[in-house]
Image (spheres, helix red, strand yellow):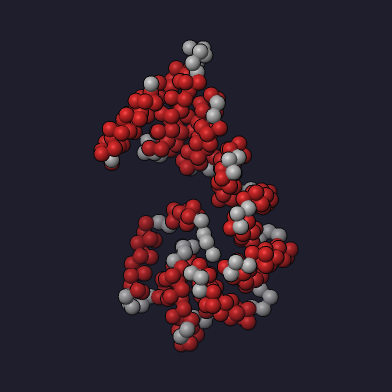
Amino acid sequence: MLVSSSKITRAREMVTKTEEKQLNQLEIQVDNGGGGTWEYLCLVRNLKLRRSEKVLKHGSSILNDPRKRSALGPYEWTLNEQVAIAAMDCQCLGVAQSCIKALQKKFPGSKRVGRLEALLLEAKGLWGEAEEAYASLLEDNPLDQAIHKRRVAISKALGKPSIAIELLNKYLELFMADHDAWRELAELYLSLQMYKQAAFCYEELILSQPTVPLYHLAYAEVLYTIGGVENIISARKYYAATVDLTGGKNTRALLGICLCASAIAQLSKGRNKEDKDATAAPELHSLAAAAVEKEYKQKAPDKLQLISSALRILKT
């Protein structure tokens, strides 16, 4: 079962440095036989991280030991679920099936276990059967967010972005505040070069989370790609907002301002010389270019001459 890198990145963003340090220390301790296996597994689960190989190894060591397993009490079933998902990530489908069977025996007819059964079908590549299983589960609970998202994942895995878009739009009719879903939808639209639709998604994200620089940056790049004087002027504003929100530390946004200034200067030739947007372009280009060169001088001095040359070309 594959997980997109963007989702893994988002999960990492939610983990504090203190939590990450604690997890890494505990992982080293467990790997070296120093104990704390159950605490480690609980921490991975609570932080919603995917350390699948470690979870499979250490979780299986507990489940395969009757004494350790019985000491967990009711948490035995939580560990079975955790190990089943990790096993599917690692394509150890026999282990996953064993864990799911134990859960089926303990909780017959459970919808939560039903989701695991459908995930196992996905892991086996039985897409049609997995889709049928999810559809059946949705009939009982139409508001199950996890199942809606799995159906989108299946469509993506099958290389059917149009169906994934359709499913995500239906999902967002029910869960309009799901920021990750809007971002996923925007990325799907971009993959199909549907830039205006992607722009709408980023507008929704900016309205709901106006202080997240990533959304301003993504929206600016979409507007720049669409082109036209008005869109590029707007793109420059959102690049500037990104620079502002990051304290001037976003080199990509600074370069975006330079590109916009160059494009506006080219597209505004012959227009009213009193046009403030056109006359401001050279000044903004100079400021952004100076910030970029300063950044390269500090962090990549060997590339400074190259970037300086490129910025001069943009200004001409």
Q: Is residue 156 visible?
A: yes
Q: Quadrant of residue 150?
A: bottom right
Q: Quadrant of the N terminus?
A: bottom right
Across and down, in percent, residue 121 comes to 62, 69
Seen in the image, is 155 located left or right of residue 40?
A: right
For the point 66% across and 73% down, which residue is it?
A: 110
For the point 54% across and 74% down, which residue is it?
A: 93
Across and down, in percent, residue 298 comes to 26, 38
Seen in the image, is 304 located left or right of residue 116?
A: left
> For the image shown, how many numbered marks are present on the structure?
0
Across and down, in percent, residue 272 comes to 51, 12
Q: Is residue 152 visible?
A: no
For the point 55% across and 26% down, which residue is it?
A: 228
For the point 28% across and 40% down, which residue is it?
A: 300
Front in this rendered view, residue 218 or 26: 218
The correct choice, above or below, for 164 with respect to 233 in the image is: below
Across and down, in percent, residue 9 comes to 45, 54
The correct choice, above or below, for 185 with respect to 39 in the image is: above
Q: Quadrant of residue 286?
A: top left
The correct choice, above or below, for 293 with respect to 110 in the image is: above
Q: Quadrant of the C terminus?
A: top left
In the displayed orientation, state which residue is furthest to the bottom: 67
